[in-house]
Image (cartoon, helix red, strand yellow):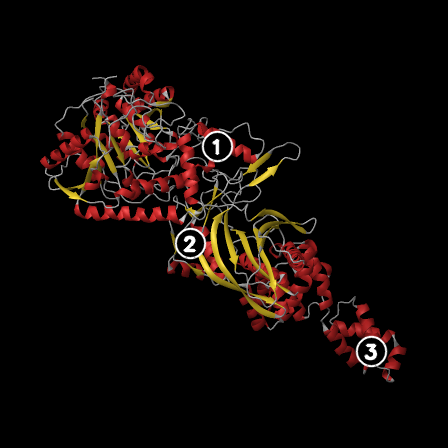
Amino acid sequence: MEYEPVIGLEVHAQLLTNSKIFCGCSTKFGGSPNSHTCPVCLGMPGVLPVLNKMVVEYAMKMALATACGINGECSFARKNYFYPDLPKGYQISQYAYPLAEHGHVDIEVNGGRKRIGITRIHMEEDAGKLMHDEHNPASYVDLNRTGVPLIEIVSEPDMRSSEEAAAYLKRLHETLVYLDICDGNMEEGSFRCDANVSIRPKGREAFGTRTELKNMNSFRNVQRALEYEIKRQQYILDDGGAVVQETRLWDDGQGVTHSMRSKEEAHDYRYFPDPDLVPVAVNGAWIEKVKEGLPELPLEKRERFVREYQIPPYDAGVLTASRALADYYEEVVRLSGQPKIASNWVMGDVLRFLNEEKRDIRKCPVKASALAAMIGLIEKGTISGKMAKELIEEMYKSGRPPEAIIKEKGMVQITDEGALSGTIAGVIAANPEQLAQYRAGKEKLFGFFVGQVMKATQGKANPPLINELLKKMLAG
Amino acid sequence: MELYELTIHELQEKIRSGEVSASGILDSVFGRIEAVEVNVRAYITLLEEQAREEAAKADQRIKAGDINTLTGIPIALKDIFCTRGIKTTCGSHILHNFVPPYDATVVEKLREAGAVFTGKTNMDEFAMGSSTETSFFGVTRNPWDLDRIPGGSSGGSAAAVAAGECIASLGSDTGGSIRQPAALCGVVGMKPTYGRVSRFGMIAFASSLDQIGPFTKDVEDCAIMMNAIAGYDPRESTSVPTDVPDYRAFVERGIDGWNVGIPKEYFIEGIDAEVAAAVQKAIGVIEKLGGKCLPISLPHTEYCLAVYYIVAPAEASSNLARYDGVKYGFRSENGRDLLEMYKKTRSEGFGAEVKRRIMIGTYALSSGYYDAYYKKASQVRALIKRDFDDAFRQCDVILTPTSPTPAFKIGEKTDDPIKMYLSDIFTISANLAGIPGLSVPCGYTAGGLPIGLQFLAGHFAEGRLIQIAAAYEKNTGGEKRKPSL
C-alpha cells in the first residue's frame, strides 16, 4: 500500500539573552560546572522567579517573524516531574496561555512553495545537565544551563516528507539566527528538535497512530530518523500490525530508533498556573516597538536581491544564507557599484576560502572595503582579472588591502601607451620573419605577437591595450 | 517589671533615654529563655552568641546616636525564613541540616532596622498544621498551660512572645498560622495583604496564600514591625509596588463613625461558648467606641475550607518537589538507584501531615481531575474574594472570632485531621481573598486561656486594622494578664 507520512515538529531554541529567564545569572555556554548559578536557579528553598523582559521581547521577534498572533496576556505554568537536572522538581513553562499562536512559515520544496502552520510559540526555562562518571557509579549535576531561556515552536502536522521537515527546520533555524535571538548551534543543544510522525494510507484523511522521536542533534539526523521511522511504521502496517503510541530515541550510531517509553509510562506533568509569577501583558505599543526592530528576513532579502541587484535566484539564495554574509555582499556592492561582479567574487573566491577553513564570514580577512577596492582596480584596468585571482588569495592570506600588495609585488598593469609602444616595437624588430608572414596574410600570428609582448612585460601589460597598439603597429 | 516583659515602644524609650542598653535587654531575654525554654520549647535554634555580638554593635550605634526603629530589640524568626549561614529547617527532617546561603528579604529588613535575632522558632513541618505538633523538632507548649498547644503553624513564634523569650517575632500565615496561634497565646498577630510583605526567602508552602507578619505584645508594636517589613521587593513578582503608610500613625486615631461588619456565617454552632461570649463583649466595646456594628453576609464562607484544602496542597505538592535529596538537606542512604533514592528520601524525610498534603495536592492536579478540583476551587476562590469586595462596600472592617476554640490539649486532635483543619475555619478566608487580618486578645476563658478577636479589612488596609485593634485594646476594660510560667 502507498502511505503518506504526517509530520509535526517541536523545536526548542535557546535565546541569546545575557541573563537567564528568571534570575540574573549568565547564560554563557561552557563555564565550569555550576559556576553560572545562584539560589534562584539552583531551586533553593524560599527563592522566587522574576521574569526577564528581554526573553519576552526575543520570543515576540520569532512570533512576528512567523506570522503568529501575539496574545494580549499570557502566563506561566509549572510542569511537574522529578529529575536531578531539574532542581525545583518542576519546569516553569507556558501551557494554557502561550505567548503566541496561529502562525506559519513558507518552505520551498520541489521547486514550489508550501505553507507550514505554527500552532504556538511559548517561553520556558531550560534544565541542567547530568554528567556520568564512567569509572565510578556516580552522576554529577551541572546547573549552568538551568534557567537559560528557551522558546518552544510547535508546528502543525503539515509536513508530508522528511525533506519537507528538513526544509521547515532549516527555515526556522535560519530565521532564528537572522533575528539574532539564537545561535542555532545544534551540537551544543541551543537548537533542538523533536518530531511527531505517523503514516496513513494515501488519500485517507484520518491520522494514524504517531510516535515521538527524540535525540536528533543535526538536520541530517532529523531527516534520517524520520526516514527510518516512516519505513518502520510502513513495515508494521504492511504486516497487518499496529503502530504503538510511544516516545522513541534516535540512535545515531546504529541508524535506528529505540522505544524509550510507552503512552502508559508517559508522565502526568500536573500543569497548573505558577502562583509565583503574574500574567505577562503585551500591548500593541510593545508589539509595534519590537516590530520596528525586526531585521529583513531571509525570504524577503532573497527576493530583494534578485530584484535590486539583478542576480539569479540561486546566487541570491547563497548570498543570503546568513545575515552577516548578506551584509558583507551588500557592503561590497555599495562600495564598488558592481552587484554582479561582486556576487562572483564573494560566491566564488571568498566563500571558497572561508569554506576551506570553516571560517565565519564575520572573521573574513578580506574586508568588504578591500574586496570593493580590488573590483575597482580591475574596473580601472590597474590590474587584470587574472592578476586579481592571484591578488585576492594574497589578500585573504595576509589580510592586507589590495593596493599595498600590488605595490609590493609590482603587480601593476602597464597602461602607459608610450612605454608599451616601445616594448612592442622591440618585439616586432626582433621577429622580422613572423612580421613578414603576418603581413602576407597569416593573421594567426597575431597571437604569437601578443604572447611575446606579455612575455616581455612579465604579464603586466593591459591586454586590450596590447591588442590595440599591436594591431596598429603590425599594420605598419 | 523585667525588661523582657516590655514592648518594643517601651524599650525604645528606655534606649533613647539611656536607661537601658541593647545588651541589657538581651541579657534579660536570654535570662528568661534560660528559665522557661525548657518548658515552652519555642525555639529550634538559639543564636545567643551571635545575638550578643549584634547587641554589642547596637550599643555602639546607640552611643553614636544612630538609633533605628528596632535598634537593639530582640526578635525571634520562625524557622521558615532563610537566614544566611544559619540552619533553616522549616520544622522538617528533610531540611534538618540546611544552611541557606542567603537571607530572606524580611530578615534583611529587620536587620537594617536594627533588630537583634534571638533564634529560629519552632513550627509545624512546612507550616502544615494548627498546633505546632507536626514539627520534626518536638512540640511547643502553650505558655498559658503547658499541657496545651500554642496553635500553629507559627506556634514557636507566638509562644516565644507570650513567654517573654523575645520582644516580638515573625511568623507566616497561609491559612491562619499567625492569627490562630496569636489568639491561643494571647498576643497580637497580623497577616498583611498578599503582596504587602515580600515572600522572598520564606520557604514556600502555598505560594498564592503565604504571607509574612509579626507577633507582638500590643498593637503599637505590630505597627512598628509592619513599618519595618512592609514594602515592594523587586525579587518577588507578586510583590505590589504601592506606597507603605506609617502604620504607627493609625494607633491613636479611634474609630468613631466606623461601620463594623459582623458576618453571620462566622457565628456558627460548634463555636466555644466562652469564645462566643468574649467576642460578643468585644462587639459591645466597639459600639461604645463609636463603631456601628451591622450584620453582613459572606455567602461563600462554607466553601472556604474545601477550597483551601485543594489549593494549598496542590501548590504545596509542587513547592515541595525540590526536596529530593539531590542538592541539599536530608538524603536517604538506602536508595540503590535514582528512583529509590527519591522515594526513600521523601518517605523518610517528610512527616505524616506533609505527606498527606502532598498526596492530596498531587491527586488534585492529576490529569483528568484538574478541572474538577483545582480549577473548580480557583473559581470558587474568586467568589469568596467577591464576597469580601461586596462586604467592604458596606463596612470599614469585619469583626469575627479568630479561632472557634481556645488552645486545645496536646495530642487532642492529632489523629483527626479534619478536626484539626476546622481550627482555621475563621482565618482561611482572608488568605483565599488575599486581604489582611489581625488577631488581638479579647479576654480569657474561666480556665485562664486567652481568646482572640479577629479584624479583617480590604486589600492594603492594614492601617485600619491597626486603628481599630489599637482603639479596642486601649478600651477593652478587661485586665491584662501574663502567663504564669
At 42% from the left and 26% from the top, the residue drawn is B87
All told, the count of numbered labels is 3
The chain containing the residue under callout 1 comes to B
Q: Nearer the viewer, mark 1 or mark 2?
A: 1
Q: Is residue A120 left or right of residue B138?
A: right
The residue mark sitting in front, 3 or 1, is 1
Mark 2 vs mark 3: tell me if same chain.
yes
Give the CA distance from mark 2 to mark 3: 80 Å
Q: Is residue A328 above or below residue B275?
A: below
Task: Please tell me which residue lies in front, B452 or A287.
Answer: B452
- Spot occupied by residue A92 in the image (x, y as percentages of width and height): 46, 46
Amino acid type at mark 2: Tyr
- Mark drawn on residue A446: 3
Residue named by callout 2: A97
Circle nearer the N terminus (2, 3) = 2
Quarter residue B82 falls in: top left
Q: CA distance from mark 1 to mark 2?
A: 32 Å
Q: Is residue A334 above or below residue B143?
A: below
Residue A116 image offset from top left, x and y in percent: 54, 64
Residue type at numbered disc 1: Arg
Q: Which residue is mark 1?
A: B346
Front-lying residue, A343 or B78:
B78
Q: Are marks 1 and 2 in contact (CB under 8 Å)?
A: no
Marks 1, 2 in one chain? no
Q: Is residue A107 left or right of residue B476?
A: right
Looking at the rendered structure, the secondary structure element under dot 1 is helix
Residue B29 in which image quadrant: top left
Between A74 and A399, the one nearer to me in the picture: A74
Residue at 29 percent across and 43 percent down: it is B303
Q: Residues within 10 Å of mark 2 (few under 14, many from 20)?
A: some
